[in-house]
Image (cartoon, rainbow, N blue to C red):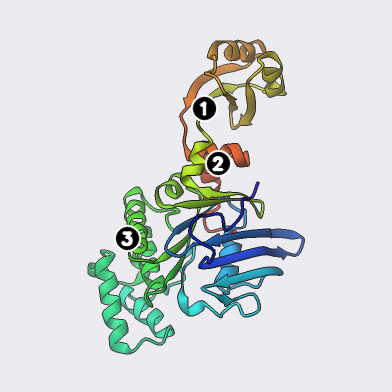
Amino acid sequence: MELDPDASGHGPEPLIAVSGLKKAFEDVVAVDGISFSVERGEIYGFLGPNGAGKTTTINILTGLSRPDSGAISVAGLDCSGNPKAAQHMIGVVPDESNLYPELSGFDNLCFCASLYGMRRRERQERAEELLRAFGLEQAAGRRFAGYSRGMKRKLTIAAGIIHRPPILFLDEPTTGIDVASARQIRQLIADLNSTGTTVFLTTHYIEEAERLCRRIAFIVRGRIARVDTVENLMRDTEGRHVVRFSFRGDAGRVCERIEAALPGLRCSRVPDGVRVESADPVRVGPVVRLLEDDGLEVTEARKIYPSLEEVFVSITGIEAGLMKQEKERNRGGGGS
């Protein structure tokens, strides 16, 4: 189900409007006719697994790739025929750093600023300002190659906003970094947004999207499955009871047997087990007995409390933990 892309309650003129966007690479359809809008001043989450079409969408919106079809408008500028029409208004932080390893942090920022036509004094002052703001002042003269992963992400974000763009595209900003650095980067994103920057955030971390975003689009296999506010998405969990059963053994057609034997339960397979949902509290005993009668060794029965992760699993059928593991395994591999 894809909601009206303009059904956000903010007004009829979004800052970014996308309609019927398509992009294929030979026989692989990366983006399959998606439509959505981003309102001025919001953090808009683009949530999905590796290979869902997130990075392809960002590349199209930022002028790095041309769509096969579809309409794109950024701040009232038609970018469908001229992908670079709004580039002066856009900052981009790719999922892999595009900065120069042999240059220092300071020199990298100054070089990026020069690409936007900033005068020497202005770009030096701006570089120093951002290095202080991002806690990198002590590392300003060090080569970028010697930075930690967290420091590299922070400097890459600084480079993306060196020219004070009103729109910032962040592609998986906290993937592969330590917890403390990820927390700092989330706070930096929130601070940027509080000063008026509109943020388009792709992520596979559901808790990150839940903390930062007002609205979220779920994208799976190149299509948007749902667009809504976090508040409305969380309403989907009201009145639902979910228990996850983990077990060892060959599950076979266990979900069909659970639903046939225990009316009112809805069952779906997850890694190493099943997820059972009901409008009433789930009685664990009958489910465990049925699983054991099938020769399965039940290792855990765990109640799942309402969360955005549950909404994601319900809408997409994709286990969130598996999505996270897949992204980490593929770090440095193909795009999404």
| Residue for badge 2 | 312
Which circle's residue, 1 or 2, is located before the other in the chain? 1
Cα separation, mark 3 vs mark 2, equals: 27 Å
Residue 211 placement, left or right of 218: left
Cα separation, mark 1 vs mark 3, equals: 35 Å
Quarter of the figure with residue 19: bottom right
Residue sitting farthest toward the right: 27
Residue 289 placement, left or right of 29: left
What numbered label is drawn on residue 191? 3
| Residue for badge 1 | 239
Residue 39 in view in this figure: yes
Q: Residue at x 42, y 83 (%)?
A: 116
Give the percent coordinates (x, y) of residue 150.
36, 58
**210 vs 14, nearest the viewer:** 14
Residue sitting farthest toward the bottom: 119
**266 vs 184, nearest the viewer:** 266
Which circle's residue, 1 or 3, is located before the other in the chain? 3
Give the percent coordinates (x, y) of residue 274.
60, 26
Secondary element at image label 1: loop
Q: Between label 1 and label 3, give the one nearer the viewer.
A: 1
How packed mark 3 is, by other alpha carbons closer than 10 Å (few <14, some 14-19, many 20 or more), is few
How packed mark 1 is, by other alpha carbons closer than 10 Å (few <14, some 14-19, many 20 or more), is few
Going by the numbered disc 1, the residue's amino acid type is Gly
Q: Between label 1 and label 2, give the one nearer the viewer.
A: 1
Secondary element at image label 3: helix
Residue 103 in view in this figure: no
